[in-house]
Amino acid sequence: MRITKAMAMLVLGMGLLSTVQAKVSEYSFDNGLKLIVREDHRAPVVVSQVWYKVGSSYEYNGITGASHVLEHMMFKGTGKLAPGEFSRIIAANGGRENAFTSRDYTAYFQRLEKSRLKVSFELEADRMRGLQMTDEEFQKEVKVVMEERRLRTEDKPESYTYEQFNAVAQLSSPYRTPVIGWMADLESMSVDDLKDWYQRWYAPNNATVVVSGDVDPEEVYQLAKQYFAPLKPSKNLQAPKPQTEPKQKGLRRIQVKMPAQLPYLLMGYAVPSLNVAEHEWEAYALEVLAGVLDGGSSARLPTRLVRDQGILTSTGAGYSLASRLSGQFLLEAVPAQGYSIEQAQQAVLKEIKELQKTPVAAEELERIKAQVVASNVFERDSIFYQAMQTGVYETIGLGWKRLDEYVDKVQAITPQQVQAVARKYFIEDHLTIAELVPLPMDKKSSAKKTTGGQHGKH
Amino acid sequence: MESTRFLTAILLAAVSLFMSAAQAAPEIQHWQSARGAQVYYVHAPGLPIVDLQITFNAGSARDGQQSGLSSITNHMLDLGAGSLDATKIAQRFEGVGAEFSRGSDRDMAWLKLRSLSQGKWLDPALDTMALILSGPTFDKQVFERERKRYLSSLKREKQNPESVASRIFYKAVYGNHPYANMPNGTEDTLKAMSVADLKRFFASYYVASNASVAIVGDIDRKAAEALVERLLKKVAVGAPAKPLPMVAELQKAKLIRIAHPSTQTHILMGHPGNYRGDPDYFAMYVGNHALGGSGLVSRLSDEVREKRGLSYSVYSYFSPLARKGIFQVSMQTRNDQAEQGLKVLRKTISEYVDKGMSEKELQASRKNITGGFPLRIDSNKKILGYLAMLSFYKLPLTYLDDFNKNIEAVSLQQIQDTLRRRLHTDRMVTVIVGGEG
C-alpha cells in the first residue's frame, strides 16, 4: 500500500528564534490518494481536510459555477447517508465543518477533538465516490447558491466590479469566470451536469487528504488505509486544457454603472504565479513588491496616498503567489472626498512608476522581511491555517515542500529584483482598469414605513 | 435503513471515546497591576509568541450624545503619539514583525499586540505600545482627515442593505439606551466633534483602573508582571467607568420596511437578549443552539434553507454584553420571496418557543457543544479572546473549567421555561430592507 513516506523537519530560519518544528509525514496509496500529516501537539484537536483538484478554473463556458454547486451537493446524501446527515453526524461528534471552492481547488474540512478523526475519514471516504444527487435536492440547493450569489456579488457593487474586471482582464484564461458562476449558468444548470462533474473529478487519484493536529502519523495512515485505500481510482481523469491567456496588446478599460454611494477603482497587471513564473524569483519579488505597496500600515500606499496626500480613503494591493495559472496583480482604490477616480488612478500609477525608477530602500525591504519571518511563526498558532496552506500548495501543483522555502526565498529578494519585476510586468499594455460609476440609490431608499408588528398573532 | 446503521455505529464509537477525552482548560493566573489594572495570564510556551490585549471599559456605550466618539478615539490611537507620527509608529511595530491592532465595540475598546517572544523583537514593540498608551497626540489635521474617511465609510454602508438594516434594527430595539447607536457614529455627530472631545474621552476612560490586560504566550509569570508594569508605567490610575443603565424590554412589536435597490431583501428580527453573567446564560445558549446557532443543522436553517432553498445564510444568536445585548434572527432572500421568508421565520421561532426543543435536539446540541469544547481553546489567539472576555466581564476564573459542566446541567424543562420567559415572539422588532421595502 504505502509507496513513499517522506518526512521533513521544518526548522525556522534566521537562527534568531527558538526552534519551531512541525513534523510533516507524507504517504501515498495505490489508488493515487495522497495523505499529508502535520503534527502539532499543543492542543488535543485535529483538522481533517480533503482537497480535490477541481475548481472554477477547470470549468468551461455554460457550466461555470458547477464546482461550487457540487460542493454544496456534497452534503446532500450518499448511498449510506440521507441529505444533511453528514452534518448531523459531525455536529454530534462536537465537530465544526465546512467546505470551500476556489479557482483551483475544492476542499472539505472538519475540526474535531482528536479522537474523532475516524468519523471524518469514514464520512469523507463515503462521499468521495458514493455521492447520490437527486433532482429534488439539486433544485433547492441551486436556489441557495443563487441567493449566495445575490448576497456576495449582485448586491455588492465592488464585488460586481471585480467580477466584470476579471472577465475583461482575461480573455481565454478560465480565471475570467467567477467561482460562484454566472447567474445564467446557474439558471440553466442541471443535476446531470453535476453528476458528470462529480464522476470526472471526485476520486482518490485526484485528492489529497491533509491532517493537522495532535495525532500520530502512523495511526492516521492506518486509518486512511482502512477508509480511503479501498476506493477505486478514476480511469478517465484528464488534465484541464491549458487555455493559456494570449498576450495582452494594449490597455483595457471598463466602467460598471450601478446604484452605489462611492466610486471604486480596480486595476490589474497580468503577472505569473509561482507555478508558471519563468524564473521563480520573479514570483517572490512580486510578493515582496505587494508588501512594499500594502504590507502593513507603514507600506507605501496607505502611508503616501491615504495619510500623507489624503487622495484615497482606502486602498490595497494584492498578488496571488500560490495559483495554478497566471493571474493579475491587483491595485484598488477609493478616492477621498473631493478627489476623482482619475486622480486616484494617477496617484496609484505614480507609485508604480516610482518602483520602476528607484530601487526600494534597504530599510523598507528589511521591514517587509521582518514581517514575513514573524508571520511565518504566527501562522503556526493555527493548525487550520497550516493545513490550508499545505492543501493549497499540494493541489495547485507546487507541492507542500515548497512552503518550507518561502521565508528563505523571500529573504533572498534584492531591491534590484523588485525593480526588475516592476519594470517587466507593470507595463501599460498589460493593464486593465475597471471603474465603478455610482448611480443614484433610488429616491425610494429613503422611504421608511413603520407599523405595529404582526408577529405573535399566529 | 442503511443510513441509520451508519449513524449508530459512529455515534457509539463517539460515546466510548468521550470518556477518555477529558479536557483540561488552560491554567489562568490573575493579579492586579500596581496601577490597578486586572491582569489575566496563561503561560503557553509551545510557540515563541506573545499575545497581549489591553481592554478599556470605553466602548460606544460611553459616547453620550456624541455617537462615534469611542470609535474614532480608538482609531486615532496609533496615528500619532509622543514625537512619532502614524508612519513612524507603524514602522516601529512592523520593523520587528509585530502585529499591532486596535478596535472597539459597544462595551469595550482595546489595543492588541502579537509579537515574537524574544526580547529583541518584543521589547521595541512593547515600548511603542506603552508610548501610545501614555498619550496619543490627537493631531487636529489628522483628525480632519480621518473624520472624512469615517464619513466615506458611512456612505459606503448605505450601499449595503444589511448594514442599513442593522443600524435601524439597533435603534428600534434599544431606543434611548446607549446600545442603540452604531459604534461608527453618524454624519451629524461626527461633523460636530473636535479633538478636544477625543482628548477628554481618552483621559476619562483609557486609565489603569478602567483596564484589564490579557496575556498568553511564551513568557513566564515574572516577565509577564514586568511587561504589564512597563506597559502601564505612564497610564493614569483614574477611575473605573460607571455602570451602564439597564436595558428596557420592548413593550410591543414593531415592523419597519425600507426600500433598497438590491436584488435581495434582508430580514432582521429580535429584541434585547442576555448579558454576561446572566443566570439564564447557559439555558439560552443551548436553547439558541438548536434554533439557529448551529449552522446547517439548526431548525431555522432546516426550514429556510434545507427545505425551501430560500436563503444562503440564516441564523439566530444572543450577543451578551455588560447589559442585555442583542438577540437577532436574520436571513436574506430574493425580493419576491421576502414575505414567504418572513412567514417561515416567524412560524419557526413561535413553534420553538411554544413547544420547546425536543429531547433529541437537546442531546444533539449538548454533544456538539461539549464535544467541541477543545476547539474553543486550541490556539493562543482563541485563549487570549477568552481571557479578554473573562477579565472585562469579571467572570469566574473557572469559567472554562466549568463550561461543559454548565452545559450538561441545563435540562429540557429549564430551557423551555427560559425561552418562554426570555424570547418574546409578540414583542419583536422586525426590519426588512430591500426591493420596494
Image (spheres, rainbow, N blue to C red):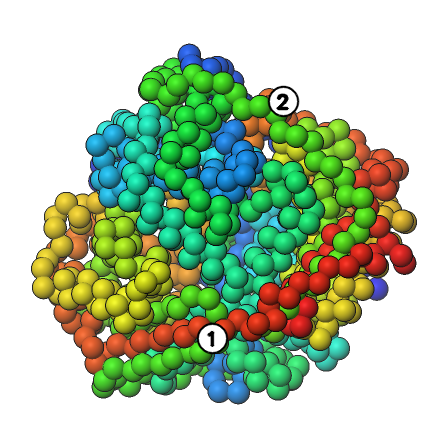
Q: Is A251 drawn above or below residue B227 in the view shown?
A: below
> In the rendered image, which quarter is residue A176 located in?
bottom left
Q: On residue B396, which mark appears?
A: 2
Q: Which amino acid, by three-letter code, is at mark 1? A: Leu
Identify residue for label 1: A439
Q: Is residue B266 left or right of residue A286?
A: right
A342 or A424: nearer the eye?
A: A342
Q: Is residue B414 left or right of residue A141?
A: right
Q: Is residue B429 visible?
A: yes
Q: Is residue A359 left or right of residue B325?
A: left
Q: Which amino acid, by three-letter code, is at mark 2? A: Pro
Q: Position of residue B365 (x, y in %)?
A: 75, 45
Q: Position of residue B151 (x, y in %)?
A: 43, 54
Q: How busy is the neighbourhood of tag 1: few (under 14 within 10 Å), some, or many (20 plus)? A: some
Q: Position of residue B82 (x, y in %)?
A: 25, 30
Q: Mark 1 or mark 2, which is nearer to you?
A: 1
